[in-house]
Image (spheres, rainbow, N blue to C red):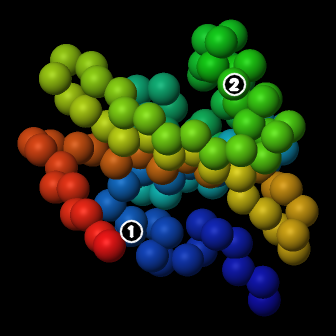
Amino acid sequence: MKKSISDVSYFEQYPSSITVCDTEGIIVAMNGASRDNFSRKGGGRLIGTSLYDCHPEPANIKILEMMHHEEAQTYITENKGRKRLIHQAPWYNNGVLAGLMETIIDISGEIEVRKRN
């Protein structure tokens, strides 16, 4: 039996939010942290819906560009003193673009920078 990404316990229990969409922008998977994070917008009921309905037009344009160019982006958001690291990247199935995956990591305090040679 083939397992889907939502069947994998480490995905489900990962402490940061992971949301996955297909190439049409349809949300296909959310881990527990993602469902909690987006609970006010429907949580797990968002699976099967378009992420384009969740974003303003400028963000949708960026999402389409990331899909078209198969590019990732990483940035930090801040709202009411809460900082979060957002990483959005393409994911692939058998070497073919399958959509985008977004990871949201809560940031508290200062982040240590480790310089390496």
Question: Which residue type carries mark 2?
Answer: Lys
Q: Going by the image, does 109 lie left or right of 73? A: left
Above or below for 97 versus 55: below
Q: Earlier in the sequence, mark 2 or mark 1?
A: 1
Q: Which mark is residue 69?
A: none
Q: Is residue 89 above or below residue 81?
A: below
Quarter of the figure with the N terminus: bottom right
- Left or right: where 2 falls relative to 51: right
Q: Position of residue 96 (x, y in %)?
A: 89, 62
Looking at the picture, does residue 10 appear above or below residue 51? below
Q: Residue at x 49, y 69 (%)?
A: 11
- Circle 1 residue: 13
Picture coordinates of residue 50, whole percent (x, y):
73, 30
Q: Amino acid at mark 1?
A: Gln
Quadrant (top left, top right, bottom left, bottom right) of the C terminus: bottom left
Q: Secondary structure at mark 2?
A: helix
Residue sitting at x 16%, y 23%: 81
The furthest residue to the bottom? 1
Q: Which residue is most to the left?
A: 109
Dot 1 lies on which element?
A: helix
Above or below: residue 3 compared with residue 116: below
User: Mark 2 to mark 1: distance in Å?
Assistant: 29 Å
Q: Residue furthest front?
A: 117
Quick one: 102 or 5, which is closer to the camera? 102
Disc marking residue 62: 2
Instruction: Judge whether residue 36 can be spotted in this image.
Output: no
